[in-house]
Image (cartoon, grey):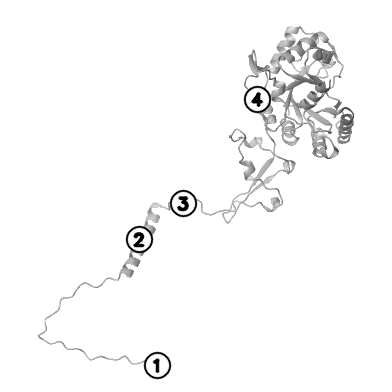
């Protein structure tokens, strides 16, 4: 490569007599100065971080995408709009985690790249199910009085009864026979009780054993899921040795005062039931003398009576009608045989009875097979021309036709 020669200028000679000039301050370039100041500030900030720490260290390092895992990719998603919708009174309804069995969350560990993977999916039993309107929390003002063992139901000053206040609201559809199902024996087995509350349609009436622990919590949870509730009264069976009905059993041979005291103790176990049903009671139901004070007390407290498995023309039912206590009876026990096919047959019998009589009531126990078959049967009952109804609605419809 050939480089051009640099040109050489001859030196300029200054006169020896010329006075020496004083040097001035150099001119400042403002752009360079601003750049230098910025670099200086950056260096100072870096040094401060090293000494005092990063002020943003407590904040989020990454924005994560919370996408379902492969296993939950096809699962239905949850609408946050639905989850955050306030109740009618403007307050948000609160539930504990153990009260949300219709949803499940799959939470994975943080992986090697530092990402947290969370999948929130809807369980199969609640998929596609319409939102449930909860029933008011019990007890309601003006419908209780203090008894010797707790609060007892009473008729309100305005004439409103607990039977009216605590029943599930219902609007009959013209031309559709009504079918009600009562599932009983709830409160002892937590898994079965949870299954009945959370998986059965809210139109299904639930009845609870008065001896159950945390009875009021179970009733509150059932009503929060839209179910109306009955309280089971243990009554004397024909064979007490074979059928244990507990220490507060109403006895056909007991003095009236003893039975009334036991009734008040049983009724004070919880609040929010619209009526009572019998647990056993074949012998008690045959005694008019023992039944009369009990049905009078139930009538005075504004309750109803739904009998099950003791017959429709017993001394107990006759005394209830004489006392003007609203009463009706289950037409079929649907699970005397705990087999899926036998239960399906009984549910078909209920449909036939409803066609003939405009309504029908079936009663069953909280066996897993019973709840499974009732749930399946109820899913498409409307497509067959029937209407699933709470037991209170059938009782009221039958009373209106008398």
Residue that sits furthest to the left in the current view: 17
Secondary structure beneath dot 3 equals loop
Above or below, 50 against 312 in this view is: below
Residue 388 in the image, given as x and y percentages of width and height: 80, 33
As measured in the structure, the alpha-carbon distance from the residue carrying label 4 to the one carrying label 1 is 104 Å
Secondary structure beneath dot 4 equals loop
Of callouts 3 and 2, the N-terminal one: 2
Of callouts 4 and 3, the N-terminal one: 3
Of callouts 1 and 3, the N-terminal one: 1
Q: Is residue 159 left or right of residue 250?
A: left
Q: Quadrant of the C terminus?
A: top right
Locate residue 324: give its quadrant: top right
Of callouts 4 and 2, the N-terminal one: 2
Q: Which residue is mark 4?
A: 138
Locate residue 362: give its quadrant: top right
As measured in the structure, the alpha-carbon distance from the residue carrying label 1 to the one carrying label 2 is 46 Å
Q: Which residue is mark 1?
A: 2
Q: Which of the two discs, 1 and 2, sits closer to the camera? A: 2
As measured in the structure, the alpha-carbon distance from the residue carrying label 4 to the one carrying label 3 is 49 Å
Q: Which residue is mark 3?
A: 57
As measured in the structure, the alpha-carbon distance from the residue carrying label 3 to the one carrying label 2 is 21 Å
Residue that sits furthest to the front in the current view: 174
Q: Which residue is mark 2?
A: 41
Residue 319 in the image, given as x and y percentages of width and height: 81, 12
Of callouts 4 and 1, the N-terminal one: 1
Secondary structure beneath dot 1 equals loop
As measured in the structure, the alpha-carbon distance from the residue carrying label 4 to the one carrying label 2 is 67 Å
Q: Which of the two discs, 4 and 1, sits closer to the camera? A: 4
Q: Is residue 259 visible?
A: yes
Q: Quadrant of the N terminus?
A: bottom left
Closer-to-camera residue (290/188): 290
């Amino acid at each position: 490569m050939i480089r051009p020669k640099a040109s050489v200028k001859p030196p300029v000679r200054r006169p020896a007599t010329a006075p020496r000039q004083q040097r001035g301050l150099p001119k400042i370039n403002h752009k360079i100065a601003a750049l230098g100041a910025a670099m200086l500030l950056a260096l100072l900030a870096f040094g401060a971080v090293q000494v005092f720490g990063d002020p943003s260290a407590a904040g989020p390092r990454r924005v994560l995408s919370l996408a379902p895992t492969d296993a939950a990719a096809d699962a239905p998603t949850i609408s946050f709009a639905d989850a955050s919708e306030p109740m009618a009174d403007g307050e948000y309804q609160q539930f504990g985690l153990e009260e949300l069995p219709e949803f499940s969350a799959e939470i994975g560990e943080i992986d090697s790249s530092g990402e947290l993977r969370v999948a929130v999916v809807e369980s199969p039993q609640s998929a596609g199910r319409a939102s449930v309107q909860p029933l008011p929390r019990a007890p309601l003002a003006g419908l209780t009085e203090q008894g010797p063992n707790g609060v007892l139901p009473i008729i309100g000053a305005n004439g409103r009864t607990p039977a009216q206040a605590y029943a599930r609201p219902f609007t009959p559809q013209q031309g559709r026979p009504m079918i009600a199902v009562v599932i009983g024996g709830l409160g002892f087995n937590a898994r079965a009780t949870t299954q009945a509350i959370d998986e059965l349609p809210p139109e299904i009436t639930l009845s609870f054993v008065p001896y159950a622990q945390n009875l009021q919590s179970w009733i509150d949870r059932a009503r929060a899921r839209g179910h109306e509730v009955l309280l089971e009264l243990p009554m004397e069976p024909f064979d007490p040795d074979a059928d244990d009905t507990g220490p507060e059993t109403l006895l056909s041979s007991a003095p009236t005062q003893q039975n009334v005291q036991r009734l008040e103790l049983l009724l004070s176990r919880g609040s929010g039931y619209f009526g009572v049903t019998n647990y056993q009671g074949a012998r008690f139901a045959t005694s008019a003398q023992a039944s009369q004070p009990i049905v009078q007390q139930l009538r005075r407290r504004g309750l109803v009576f739904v009998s099950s498995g003791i017959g429709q023309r017993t001394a107990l039912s006759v005394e209830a009608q004489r006392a003007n206590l609203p009463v009706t009876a289950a037409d079929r026990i649907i699970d005397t045989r705990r087999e899926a096919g036998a239960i399906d047959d009984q549910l078909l019998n209920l449909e036939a009875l409803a066609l003939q009589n405009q309504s029908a009531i079936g009663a069953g126990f909280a066996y897993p097979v019973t709840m499974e078959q009732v749930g399946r049967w109820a899913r498409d009952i409307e497509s067959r021309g029937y209407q699933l109804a709470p037991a209170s609605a059938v009782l009221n419809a039958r009373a209106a036709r008398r």
